[in-house]
Amino acid sequence: MIPVVMPTYARVDVAFERGEGAWLWTTDGRRYLDFGAGVAVTNLGHCHPKLVAALQDQAAKLWHTSNLYRVPGQEKVAAKLVANTFADTVFFCNSGAEANECAIKMARKYHYDSGDKNRTEIICATGAFHGRTLATIAAGGQEKHLKGFDPQMPGFVHVPYGNLNALRDAISEKTAAILVEPVQGEGGIVPGDPDYLKRLRAAADEFGLLLIFDEVQTGMGRTGALFAHQGMGVAPDIMPVAKGLGGGFPVGACLATEKAAKGMVAGAHGSTFGGNPLAMAVAETVLDVMLEPGFMDAVKAKAAKLRQGLDAIAARHGAVIEQVRGLGLMIGLKARIPNTELQARLLANGLLTVGAGDNVVRLLPPLIIGDAEIAEALAIIDRTCQEVTP
């Protein structure tokens, strides 16, 4: 008999009822150190007092009105995003997949309104993940996500991540845009080389294409900059974001330049819940915290401390960890044993992690992680590697 909750997830048999900072407590009282952050979502940790206050305050005022009317919170959050990024304008939605859908539609509409209706294809990278809608699984191009959902939505061409020559060879009169993650997340924490990303920018400009950086997972401080591309010295035309933007409250956004968004006029796109007052109150507070002086410097310092410890563990336990890779507090442990086995043993020892492609275990701790918690996580990983050493 099918469960009352549709069984679309291979869930771990653990249920949490309370969280504080980097810690979670189960319904039976066990405590876990959270190095998954809800898959890079609770970037400010669990129950951050400023987020709790913002949500409670807004909940007592107004929850929802729809986008038939002005939403002052959207104007505030959009202004802060524009002031701190390349963008001129922002569309609000509820998730990363929706933000990517908006980006895809925007790119096609841009060329349509420019009089080149044949430019509908988007060049994407192998190993990518852009969401679970029909369009975004086609953009991701991974068989495990596409299987069973034929016919595959057309309009997406895939080339190896990091291979500029292959990308340039794929450009045709049908190409509308290039869509990549600055750091591939689900694909196994694979950072894009800054030079590669800059050359993508140059290719887009040369051929009149739009450049889309999917920063759903890499954004909101995860790599030590507000958005990953900012630390790499290159800017896109369109950028989908979500996850950390709401600190745990569902909210997504699609940022764009005025030029890229020229076709996004009234009726071109929409969302019933996108950018409602509750979501905007939380998102504004997340931005306020992350934009405080010294916040990103602290993230970089914590990332360096964690990475140094992980490199030392990998050197001691090369039979378990083949490679440590990533950027900022978006780190992957490429395992020599099945990553699911390593995850399970880490869980048993009190550390929550997230799996990824290429046999990688992701470490995505809250950005507010403390030195003591970093030390405890390193001790757990070291002990676990000793336990599983072949």
Image: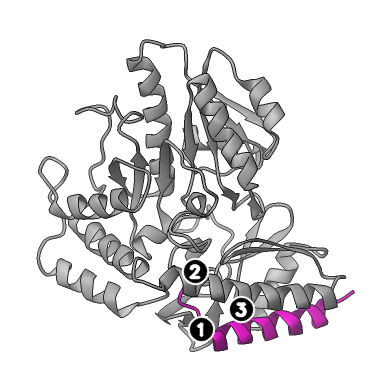
Per the image, label 3 sits on a secondary structure element best described as strand
Residue 96 falls left or right of residue 48: right
**Residue tagged 3:** 351
Residue 148 falls left or right of residue 46: right
Q: Is residue 73 above or below residue 125?
A: below
Tag 2: residue type? Ala
The answer to whether residue 149 shows anywhere in this view is no
Give the alpha-carbon distance from disc 2 to disc 1, as whole Å: 14 Å
Q: Residues within 10 Å of mark 3 (few under 14, many from 20)?
A: many
Residue at (49, 42) in percent of width and height: 213
**Residue 81 % position (x, y):** 31, 52
**Residue tagged 1:** 370
Residue 329 falls left or right of residue 216: right
Q: Earlier in the sequence, mark 3 or mark 2?
A: 2
**Residue 23 % position (x, y):** 48, 82
Quarter of the picture holding the C terminus: bottom right
Q: In which image quadrant can residue 324 be found?
A: bottom right
**Residue 372 % position (x, y):** 56, 89
Give the alpha-carbon distance from disc 3 to disc 2, as whole Å: 11 Å
Tag 1: residue type? Gly
Q: Is 377 covered by the magenta stretch?
A: yes
Tags 2 and 1 in contact by the CB under 8 Å rule? no
Q: Which residues are magenta?
A: 366-390
**Residue 345 % position (x, y):** 71, 76
Q: Is residue 204 above or below residue 133?
A: above
Residue that extends furthest to the right in the rendered view of this protein? 390
Q: Is 162 covered by the magenta stretch?
A: no
Residue at (32, 66) in percent of width and height: 286
Per the image, label 1 sits on a secondary structure element best described as loop
Q: Residues within 10 Å of mark 1 (few under 14, many from 20)?
A: some
**Residue tagged 2:** 37
Tag 3: residue type? Leu
